[in-house]
Amino acid sequence: MRLVGIAALVAGALMFAPPVAAQTDDALAPARAGQAQCFVPNAEAKTCQSIASYVFNANGVIDNISETLLMPQPVVVMRTSSPVTARDNALCGPLTAEDLGRATFTIDGRPATEEETANIRAGLTQHLAPMFNVEICVSVSAVAGGYQANSTVGGTARPDLAQPMLWVRPEDGYRVAP
């Protein structure tokens, strides 16, 4: 879920930003304003299945920084950084073996050991290999009460991958957790 880590908001107007994405053609307008995408949010616990934030580099490259919950017990979180492009009001980029090779992991909040990291990477590589180098695009649409992240994989719409999404600010206190 790199980008989807990569994508319905919980009610509560004070808990999320105004629907900026629904008002502009710039899919990254909320990110440019310092917000991050919280996928599958739990507003009560202030948790997300994954959080994606963006770094806008002077050379025009946009880096997606993603934290994704891999396991709830023990709590295993993967952190990746990879370039994305904004196209047709979607964020697009492939998952690569190199992305996975640079990923870092935490287990119950502590950095994974080298052995744990190797084991996690091996399992993820086996599971995700068919997705390597396939372009994944995520667009955000306004839905009743919030947003939904919609995905295409290799140019094919994947409604089964649709996820509720929330734009959050750092001071909102959201984190990746079960």
Image (cartoon, rainbow, N blue to C red):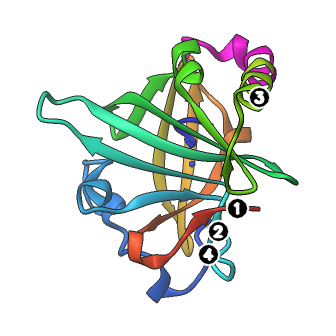
Q: CA distance from mark 2 to mark 1?
A: 6 Å
Of residues 36 and 86, which is closer to you in this image?
36
**Is residue 11 in view?**
yes
Q: Earlier in the sequence, mark 3 or mark 1?
A: 3
Q: Which residue is mark 3?
A: 120
Who is closer to the viewer here, 73 or 164? 73
Quadrant for residue 35, please give it.
Answer: bottom left
> Looking at the image, is 120 positioned above or below residue 159?
above
Q: Amino acid at mark 1?
A: Ala
Q: Residues within 10 Å of mark 4 (few under 14, many from 20)?
A: some
Report which residue position mark 1 lands on. Answer: 177
Which residue lies under the disc numbered 4? 46
Tag 2 near tag 1, CB within 8 Å: yes
* Kind of residue at badge 2: Thr
Q: Amino acid at mark 3?
A: Ile
- Residue 163, position in %: x, y? 65, 52
Label 4–label 3 contact, CB within 8 A: no
Please report whichever mark, 3 or 2, sits nearer to the chain's N-terminal start. Answer: 2
Residue 39, image x and y in percent? Answer: 59, 56
Q: Secondary structure at mark 3?
A: helix
Q: Residues within 10 Å of mark 3 (few under 14, many from 20)?
A: some
Contact between labelled residues 4 and 2, with CB atoms less than 8 Å apart: yes
Spot occupied by residue 138 in the image (x, y as percentages of width and height): 49, 38
In the figure, 145 relative to 132: above or below?
below
